[in-house]
Each structure stands twice: as structure tokens, then as C-alpha cells.
Amino acid sequence: MGLNKIQFASDNYSGICPQAVQSMIEANRDFSLAYGEDSYTQKVCDLFRKIFETDCEIFFVFNGTAANALALASLCQSYHSIICHETAHIETNECGAPEFASNGSKILLAKGQNGKLDAGEVEKIITRRSDIHYPKPKVISLTQATELGTVYTPGELQAIRDVACKYDLKLHMDGARFANALVFLNLTPAELTWKAGIDVLCLGGVKNGLAVGEAVVFFNKDQARDFAYRCKQAGQLASKMRYLSTPWLGLLGHDVWKKNAAHANKMARYLKTELDKINGVKIKFPVEANAVFADMPDSVVSGLRAAGWRFYNFIGVGGARLMCSWATTKQSIDFFLKDVKKHLD
Ligand SMILES: *Cc1c(COP(=O)(O)O)cnc(C)c1O
């Protein structure tokens, strides 16, 4: 995908990884049952169960907003509330979809360093009120890896789990970049989810190398009851489901998802290391997954933009957000760094 100047704007600017394309082609040989009744979808679900080492329920939807909104709605009644970090995607980038899907469950915002929920802050929100006039806290939603490119450690997850257990709350994980966290921590998918008390995981496929589609993984099967109806009603049940599900075979098979994520993380680390060497550039957060947030002088930002480079600066708390993906090359990073240095002079 070469040295184009738009690639650092988002990890979803990358294309489809070859293994996912190959799986899609293999699913395209013949007629097949529709709406997820097909053997490919069965095979993918079995692979999920093997990888997560448990008998979980899996649903495939078109995107992450739908995955989060429908998963959260399944955990809440309309009078409940969902606690998340103030920079969480469900709060800042889903146009109110979780509230819409849940008929009005309210999102309550908690603070915490580096995009991570602080267990103490969460507990403060839960215990602030207990009267009938306050939307009853029911779910804690955390993003792993976070919107700021950081990763919750097992200890931090445990602290949040303790609060959830203490007050009988459910745990939702927005895993749009789950694989990036997984390889950073070098844990198993089970250790990072149900063994850590997570009830529902929204597992991202697109940023990791799929064309379309995220998976909603319920570790508590009771919680998944009627979820298929919810998907259908929301327009999220694919009739040719096999094309949404089968590419996961390419991604999850032979650890491709982990390799893709490890590559993206490695590229982000390289970009961070090189930016660190440049006077006038400041890295804002620990680089643990595949995002680098950098403060650069305005003249550099405008110079880069004028030269055609694209990156967001509205995510989190400002600064240029530079994303790496499975397709990012060292050469393209060097190309970018050269332009940064040019505009500093
Ligand atoms: C990209 C992303 C999603 C999914 O967004 P869609 O555009 O709806 O697919 C969800 N959560 C996080 C943290 C994301 O970065």
C-alpha cells in the first residue's frame, strides 16, 4: 500500500489482509444457507470457542458502533446507566447509539489517567446516589486497548472487576483493538476476557484486517438470549452471513490477528522512538498499542497537512493521532518523519 500520506489517520484506512481475502474467496464456491445457518459460520464460531477456551455465543454485526450499542442494550434496562471513561468511543464517537439502542440508558462519565478508567472514580460514581431519581448503574464499559493507545494491565482490570462485583454491575469490553492489547500483554484471550470477569466482548475485526464486521462475544450465554432478535431488528443481521463471518477464519487462523496486531504495535513503537528524538515534538501518552499521540508545533502540523498528510486531532485530548496498522511499513514512517523534520526547520 506504499507511501501514501493518508495512512496514519486511522487503522481503518488500511485494506483487507490477504488471509481474510482468501477466506472470503473460499466461501464463495457454491450456494449456502443464509442468515448464519451455513457451515462456514458454524466453523468460525467453533474457532472462537477454541481460541477463547470456553463455550461462548458469537454474533457478527457490520460495525463497532452496532456491536457496542446492541451489546450494551442487552445488559441494560432503559432506567439503567453505563459507566465509561470520558474519552470512550461509546460516548464520543457513536452518535448516541448505545442510548438509542437501549431506549435511553444513560452514560455516566468517569475520569482516569491515559484513557483508562480509575476504579476509585468508578466507585465514586456508583455510590454518589442510591435514590430512585438517579439512573441505576448497571454496566462498566472499558476499552481495551484504549482510545489513547494505552492498555489496561491485569491489575487494573482486577480493580475494576472488584468494583463491578461489589455493586453487582456487568462488564463490557470494547475490543475494537483487542488484539493489540492481547499481544502487548502477552496473555491469552481467555485471561483477558472471561477469566477477568468480562461479560461481553465486542471484538474488532476491521482495524485488524477485515473489510467489514465485528464480533459480539457473550461469555455468559444467558445474557445472549434473544440477542439475534436485537440484531435483526437493528438491521444488523446479514443475510449472506458467510461473507461477514468467514473472513474471521483467515484472521484468527494461524494467529494472523495477533501477527497483524503485533506488527501495528511494533510500527507505532518505532514511530514513537523516532519522534522522541526530534526536538519540539512531544509524545502525549505511553505507546502500548498501535497509536501515537504527538504534540507538534502548529507550523509543523499545518505544514504536514499542506503537504497532504492526514491525521485526526479531535480524538481524546487533542494532539496529532497517528495510527499504525497491519499494513504500515517502516519505509512509510521514515517518509513521514522526513516531512516532520523538514517542517521544523
Ligand atoms: C473504531 C472503533 C470502534 C468501531 O467503530 P465503527 O466505526 O462503528 O466500526 C469502536 N470502538 C473503538 C474504541 C474504536 O476505535
Image (cartoon, grey):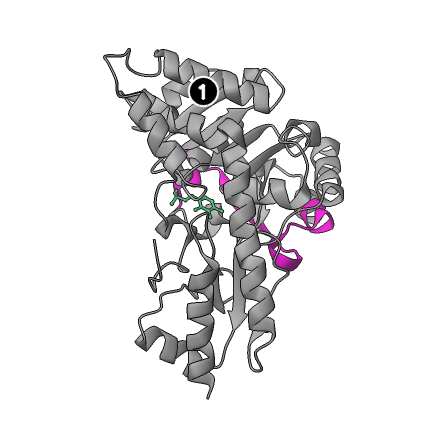
The quarter of the displayed image where residue 133 is located: top right
Residue extending farthest to the bottom is 345
Asked whether 279 or 192 is in front, the reply is 279
The image shows a total of numbered marks equal to 1
In reply to whether residue 66 is colored magenta, the answer given is: no
Name the spot of residue 242 as percent of width and height, x first: 33, 21
Image-based side of 68 in relation to 27, left or right: right
Residue, x 45% and y 56% (percent of image)? 329
The answer to whether residue 42 of the structure is visible from this angle is yes
Name the spot of residue 168 as percent of width and height, x first: 68, 29
Residue, x 50% and y 35% (percent of image)? 256
Other-residue count near label 1 (Cα within 10 Å), few / some / many at <14 / 14–19 / ≥20: many
Tag 1 secondary structure: helix
Residue extending farthest to the front is 331
Give the extent of the magenta segment.
96-123
Name the spot of residue 59 as percent of width and height, x first: 43, 23
Q: What residue type is labelled 1?
A: Val
Residue, x 56% and y 16% (percent of image)? 221
The quarter of the displayed image where residue 132 is located: top right
User: Label 1 belongs to which residue?
Assistant: 44
Asked whether 243 or 271 is in front, the reply is 271
Name the spot of residue 241 as percent of width and height, x first: 32, 21
